[in-house]
Image: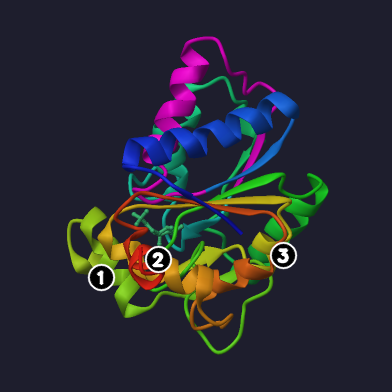
Amino acid sequence: MKIIHCKDYDDMSKKAAAMFFSQIHMKPDSVLGLATGSTPIGTYKQLIKWYEEGDLDFSEVKSVNLDEYVGLDGTNDQSYRYFMNENLFNHVNINKDNTNVPNGKAEDMDAEALRYEALIKSLGGIDMQLLGIGNNGHIGFNEPSDAFDSITHEVKLTESTIQANARFFETMDDVPKTAISMGIGTIMKAKKIVLIANGPKKADIIYETCFGPITPNVPASALQLHPDVTIIVDDEAYATILAKCGK
Ligand SMILES: N[C@@H]1[C@@H](O)[C@H](O)[C@@H](COP(=O)(O)O)O[C@@H]1O
């Protein structure tokens, strides 16, 4: 694992965007694994800026998103499809037909999970996967559990995730209780992984992810076994690492 320590959120966002900038330049038809949440918004803003300045071309890029809430379709402003359109796809020259988010309105979630898994395979796998991290160590929507989830599957969200994500919804009751998410195995198959985190709330979990035991109780700890992971964190998210290393 490489850890890049940045001074603040903007610095983190620029460095993460720079990795995707290089990826797209090196392989214009890259398959990008994309993430939602508040953390990646700055990364997407920077990519949009480079596109607007004529330095980045998304015309051949394909994308697959990590997850989607069950029960929300792309017209719902809390769906992850809507988020991606608003925060990236509508502002760059990506062909929307080449962008993929699990279908939260599928009638049969098991069939949708298998379809999504097969789709990623048919695209040749993910070249570079962007990840945020939940306060409890979840990546995508892989919640702490007794075993690592391997492939795309329906997930029951934990109370702590429902509470953390409630800030985006009008009432607690509006927060979906289930989601469909790539599995840890799906994520681990990505050729390169870039995880971003900022703020003091993420400090302990970033330490656990990088230096704690590899355990499904901290799903992100599986990344210790991946050969090409870059963790980009701001000063506040790096705090526990600094403290425990005595610096
Ligand atoms: N499924 C998403 C995750 O992919 C994301 O990493 C997490 C953290 O969100 P934030 O970046 O807002 O802290 O939120 C959601 O649960």
Depth check, front residue: 237 or 25: 237
Q: Which residue is under mark 2?
A: 241
Report the quarter where the N terminus lies.
bottom right
**Bounds of the magenta span?**
35-64
- Is residue 247 shown above or below 92? below
Q: Which residue is under mark 3?
A: 114
- Quadrant for ligand 1 reads bottom left
Which residue is outermost to the bottom?
146
Q: Position of residue 65 (x, y in %)?
A: 57, 49
- Label pair 3/1, CB-CB below 8 angstroms: no
Colour mode?
rainbow
Depth check, front residue: 200 or 144: 200
Q: Amino acid at mark 1?
A: Gln
| Residue pictured at 26% horizontal, 60% vertical | 200
Task: Tell me if 190 is positioned left or right of 234 in this view.
Answer: right
Which residue is outermost to the top?
54
CA gap between label 1 and label 2 equals 26 Å
- Label pair 1/2, CB-CB below 8 angstroms: no
Res 150 seen here: yes
